[in-house]
Image (tube, rainbow, N blue to C red):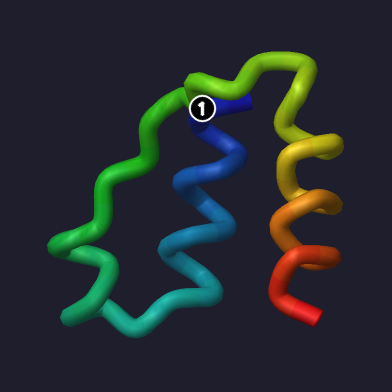
């Protein structure tokens, strides 16, 4: 999965930005979708 992600990032991002980008595992676990939805609702 990680290799496929890097291939897509290389294909779809600007090289100068990609060089400074790091991708790390999220800390929210299975709560990520709920927290994202709550954040979107809060901003409305």
Q: What residue is shown at x 84% (from left), y 65% (from top)?
A: 41
Mark 1 lies on residue? 26
Residue 9, compared with residue 11, is above or below; it is above
> Residue 22 location, x and y as percent?
27, 46
Residue at the image position 84 percent from the left and 36 percent from the top: 34
Q: What is the quadrant of the N terminus in the image?
A: top right
What is the secondary structure assignment of the residue under circle 1?
loop
Between 29 and 25, the one nearer to me in the picture: 29
Rendered-image quadrant of the C terminus: bottom right
Give the image location of residue 39, x and y in percent.
Answer: 71, 57
Q: Is residue 18 left or right of residue 4?
A: left
Q: Nearer the viewer, residue 26 or 17?
A: 26
Q: How many marks?
A: 1
Q: Residue at x 43, y 76 (%)?
A: 13
Q: Residue at x 54, y 75 (%)?
A: 12
Q: Residue furthest top?
A: 29
Residue in front for this viewpoint, 7 or 32: 32
């Amino acid at each position: 999965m990680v290799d496929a992600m890097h291939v897509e990032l290389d294909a779809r991002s600007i090289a100068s930005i990609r060089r400074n980008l790091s991708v790390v595992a999220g800390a929210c676990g299975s709560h990520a979708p709920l927290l994202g939805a709550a954040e979107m609702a809060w901003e409305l």
